[in-house]
Image: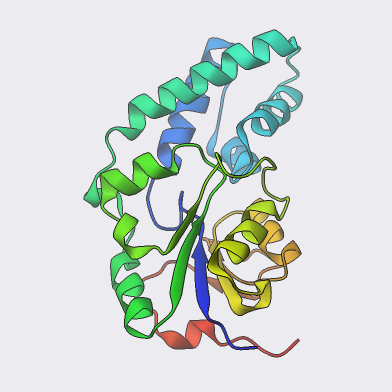
Amino acid sequence: MAIKAVVFDLDGVLVDTDRFHYQAWKRILGELGKEFTQEDNEQIKGVARLKSLEILLKMKDIDMSEVEKMRVLRKKNNWYLEYVTEVDRESILPGVEEFLELLKFNGYRTAIASTSDNTSIILELTGLKKYFDVVIDGYQVKSPKPNPEVYLVSAMALNLEPNECAVFEDSRAGVLAAKRAGMHVVAVSERPIGVADKWIRSLENLDMDVLKFSSR
């Protein structure tokens, strides 16, 4: 079945916001007397906040009550929001606007599928909102990736079957979510993500061949 729409994760695929999550988590772990490295960050990339915190607590051997977890998560998000006010058009990753223009020129529909509650803020600050027919964010879905909910909701909003959609994702959790939804997936990352159909390092210099997938 031909690809009719392209669905994007936001953080790390279109906009360089991953550094703000990293800074906020590093600050949280610092308060807890623990180090937070880039390698630690890779373990929680694309994972929802609560699950990320639980992974980090286990990794760092920290006990924490449920009440304290909620307090820490609020603090983390507040710090992230402080940092994310620095986002502007300069934060758009290389090749993004050119590829989005090319998709529109060729008649593809486009969507954002992010479980972040801050999606709308980032789209407004960067001016990217105009490129998307559908925006699905953390206010419209309950389950974090790798649950496929955000991608299934995106397909419904586009009025398309999942296998008519191609997804661009930068995390293993996101790639798994899109594959479980029955979509074709292009991993945008420094290293291949095994379950993805294709792998690219960035959206620079792409053409429509990136949307050609082998038959299943």
Q: What is the tally of numbered marks visible in this picture?
A: 0
| Residue 29 relative to residue 149: left or right | left
Between 47 and 30, the one lying in front of the other is: 47
Residue 194 in percent (x, y) is at 70, 67
Determine which quarter of the picture holds residue 130.
bottom left
Quadrant of the image containing the C terminus: bottom right
| Residue 111 relative to residue 176: left or right | left
Residue drawn at x 66%, y 28% is: 50
At x 35%, y 34%, the residue is: 84
Q: Residue at x 56, y 62 (%)?
A: 157
From the viewer's perspective, tell me whether residue 212 is left or right of residue 13.
right
What color scheme is it?
rainbow
Residue 200 image position (x, y, % from top left) = 50, 71
Q: Where, quadrant-wise, is the N terminus in this rendering?
A: bottom right
* Residue 195 placement (x, y as % from top left): 72, 67
**125 in relation to 78, above or below:** below
The foreground one among 3 and 197 is 3
Q: Residue at x 58, y 15 (%)?
A: 72
Q: Residue 111, percent across and down?
A: 47, 63
133 left or right of 138 in image: left
> Is 196 placed above or below 88 here?
below
